[in-house]
Image (cartoon, helix red, strand yellow):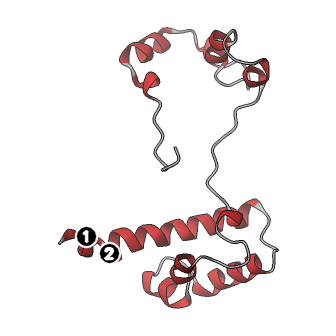
C-alpha cells in the first residue's frame, strides 16, 4: 500500500469467494456493521477496539503532504500556469486560486483537499504517460 498498490490476496482465493457467495446475505452485513462476519470470526484474535470500530476508508494524502511552507519543485512545475494550460485538463485561473488559498492556509476543507489531489494526480499521470512516454520508450 505504500506504493499505491493494495493486495488482499486471501480474499481472491476462489474457495473464499465460493464460500462467501453461499452465505446468507444477513451474515455479510448487519445493518451498517460492515464486514460483520469477518470481524466476528477474528474476534478472538484481535483487540476489541479493532473489532468494534467503524470501517475507516483509505484516503489519498492531502495538502499538508505536499505543502508545508512551499510546494516541492515538481508540484510547482506541474501546477504552473504554463503546464496547466499546455495539458489542458483544468482552468489555470482556478488552479492558481486554489494554490493561493493553500499558501494562505485557507484550504482546509475536504473539497479543497480532494480538488488539489485530483489536479496534481492528473498532472503527474499526464507528465509520466503522455509527455514522457516516448522518452522511456528508447
Pinpoint residue 62: horizontal percent, then vertical percent.
67, 61
Q: Is residue 119 left or right of residue 130?
A: right
Q: Is residue 132 left or right of residue 76?
A: left
> SS for tag 1?
helix
Residue placed furthest toward the left: 138
- Label 2 crowd (10 A; few <14 / some 14-19 / many >=20): few
Q: Is residue 86 above or below residue 69?
A: below
Pinpoint residue 26: horizontal percent, then vertical percent.
64, 13
Q: Is residue 4 above or below residue 132?
A: above
Quarter where residue 66 is shown: bottom right
Quarter where residue 57 is shown: top right
Residue drawn at x 54%, y 78% as measured from the top left: 90
Q: Is residue 50 above or below residue 100?
A: above
Residue drawn at x 48%, y 40% as measured from the top left: 6
Q: Is residue 23 left or right of residue 30?
A: left
Q: Is residue 134 left or right of residue 75?
A: left
Q: Which residue is mark 2?
A: 132
Which one is nearer the viewer's eye here, 138 or 111? 138
Residue drawn at x 69%, y 17% as measured from the top left: 46
Q: Where is the C terminus found, in terms of image quarters?
A: bottom left
Q: Are marks 2 and 1 in contact (CB under 8 Å)?
A: yes
> SS for tag 2?
loop
Which one is nearer the viewer's eye here, 130 or 111? 130
Pinpoint residue 61: horizontal percent, then vertical percent.
63, 57
Q: Is residue 129 above or below residue 32?
A: below
- Label 1 crowd (10 A; few <14 / some 14-19 / many >=20): few
Q: CA distance from mark 2 to mark 1?
A: 7 Å
Q: Which residue is mark 1?
A: 136
Pinpoint residue 60: horizontal percent, then vertical percent.
61, 54
Residue 77: numbered disc: none
Amino acid at each position: 500500500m505504500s506504493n499505491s498498490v493494495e493486495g488482499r490476496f486471501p480474499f481472491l482465493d476462489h474457495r473464499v469467494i465460493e464460500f462467501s457467495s453461499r452465505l446468507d446475505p444477513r451474515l455479510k452485513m448487519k445493518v451498517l456493521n460492515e464486514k460483520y462476519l469477518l470481524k466476528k470470526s477474528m474476534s478472538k484474535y484481535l483487540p476489541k477496539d479493532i473489532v468494534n470500530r467503524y470501517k475507516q476508508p483509505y484516503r489519498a494524502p492531502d495538502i499538508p503532504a505536499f505543502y508545508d511552507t512551499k510546494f516541492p519543485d515538481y508540484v510547482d512545475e506541474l501546477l504552473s500556469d504554463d503546464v496547466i494550460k499546455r495539458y489542458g485538463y483544468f482552468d489555470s485561473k482556478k488552479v492558481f486560486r486554489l494554490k493561493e488559498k493553500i499558501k494562505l492556509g485557507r484550504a482546509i476543507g475536504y473539497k479543497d483537499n480532494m480538488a488539489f489531489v485530483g489536479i496534481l494526480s492528473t498532472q503527474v499521470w499526464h507528465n509520466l504517460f503522455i509527455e514522457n512516454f516516448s522518452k522511456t520508450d528508447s
